């Protein structure tokens, strides 16, 4: 048995708190990361997988400040970029520069296999109004649409087709399917993947793909994807910078993955971040834990 941690949407370096979702984004994130560092020492994951929106600001210092905070974990970590990380032309360069030692192959899309479990990390690009793709947001009013570049998509297909036996986790910043809006309130419209259907067709066609881990939606949410025959489960973890300031622990056994949400050992961050009307970001029990078979026959 071994474990890894899924962390997402840390938005480190936020320049102001507000009365909405971001009550503690500026004042408490460094302290929350310090608390997480202590908690990780106790949890002892093999690594932390961070699915994007790591930095809140797009200047070079912000990426390196975020890198220093994450390096303080003294635990290996794999960083994926999100739309906030690649919102400006220089952002992609700064991201790679800051996180180079943590990127397998030195690129923002990568794959690796750890103790028999394969991980494939995708890095969708921004979709321009003419349908072409750009590695960063072209203008501040560009629509919130992203798609996996063709070469990256082909690599995903080739990798999945070449080895049907290795259980696989696909990770990306963006959900493949937007969750239903929470009851009695409205989730923010955060945009989505333009090629979600094609991606889902590919993942569903390969039974070794058991899990799609992502962030971006800023709430705990779990749902099956791809119809009856698909084994793909989409697991969204809530933003670490917002209530309930949590992450997920994924225990990897011989036959199953066990996913559970976990909070910081110091409850003050969750308490300080809570806006009653936004309590839905924590998800109910159905969205906080999941058992996933790794057996080909299941
Ligand atoms: Fe995002």
Image (cartoon, grey):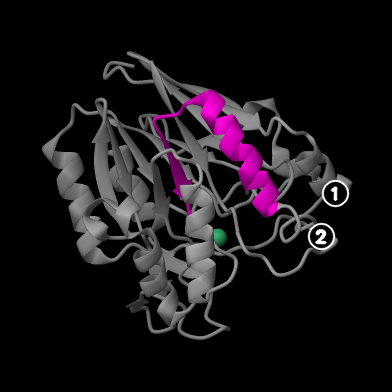
Is residue 18 covered in magenta? no
Q: Quadrant of the N terminus?
A: top left
User: Where in the figure is residue 296, as x and y percent of width and height?
Assistant: 26, 19
Say if the magenta span includes residue 30: yes
User: Which residue corresponds to mark 1?
Assistant: 275
- Image position of 186 (left or right of 137): right
Residue drawn at 54 percent across, 48 percent down: 8
Judging by the rendered image, the residue that carries numbered circle 2 is 20
1 and 2 marks in contact (CB < 8 Å): yes
- Horizontal side of 128 relative to 54 (left or right) equals left
Query: Is residue 274 rendered to the left or right of residue 124?
Result: right
Give the image location of residue 19, x and y in percent.
Answer: 85, 61
Q: Quadrant of ligand 1?
A: bottom right
Q: Left or right: where does residue 106 sit relative to residue 136?
A: left
Image location of residue 27, percent across then percent down: 76, 58
The crowd level at tag 1 (other Cα within 10 Å; few <14, some 14-19, many 20+) is: some
Quadrant of the frame with the C terminus: top left
First to last magenta residue range? 29-53
Locate residue 149: give its quadrant.
Answer: bottom left
**Looking at the image, is 297 positioned above or below residue 84?**
above
Q: Residue at x 12, y 39 (%)?
A: 162
Instruction: Please tell me whether residue 183 is drawn above or below residue 208 in the rendered image.
Output: below
Q: Secondary structure at mark 1?
A: loop
Q: Nearer the viewer, residue 135 or 14?
A: 14
């Amino acid at each position: 048995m071994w474990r890894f941690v899924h962390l997402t949407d840390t938005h480190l370096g936020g320049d102001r708190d507000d009365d909405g979702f971001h009550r503690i984004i500026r004042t408490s994130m460094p302290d929350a990361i310090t608390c997480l560092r202590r908690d990780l020492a106790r949890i002892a994951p093999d690594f932390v997988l961070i699915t994007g929106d790591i930095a809140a600001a797009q200047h070079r210092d912000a990426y390196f400040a975020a890198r220093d905070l994450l390096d303080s974990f003294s635990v290996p970590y794999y960083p994926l970029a999100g739309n906030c990380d690649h919102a400006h032309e220089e952002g992609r360069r700064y991201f790679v520069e800051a996180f180079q030692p943590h990127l397998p192959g030195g690129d923002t899309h990568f794959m690796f296999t750890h103790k028999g479990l394969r991980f494939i990390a995708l890095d969708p690009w921004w979709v321009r109004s003419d349908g072409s793709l750009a590695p960063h947001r072209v203008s501040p009013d560009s629509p919130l649409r992203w798609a996996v570049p063709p070469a990256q998509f082909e690599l995903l297909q080739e990798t999945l087709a070449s080895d049907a036996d290795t259980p696989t986790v696909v990770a990306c910043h963006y959900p493949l399917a937007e969750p239903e809006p929470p009851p009695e309130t409205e989730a923010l419209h955060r945009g989505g993947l333009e090629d979600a259907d094609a991606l889902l067709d590919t993942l569903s066609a390969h039974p070794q793909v058991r899990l799609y881990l992502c962030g971006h939606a800023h709430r705990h949410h779990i749902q099956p994807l791809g119809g009856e025959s698909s084994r793909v489960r989409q697991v969204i973890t809530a933003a670490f910078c917002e209530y309930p300031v949590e992450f997920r622990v994924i225990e990897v056994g011989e036959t199953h993955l066990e996913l559970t949400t976990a909070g910081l050992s110091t409850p003050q961050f969750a308490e300080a971040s809570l806006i009653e009307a936004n309590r839905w970001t924590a998800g109910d029990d159905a969205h906080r834990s999941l058992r996933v078979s790794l057996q080909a026959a299941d």
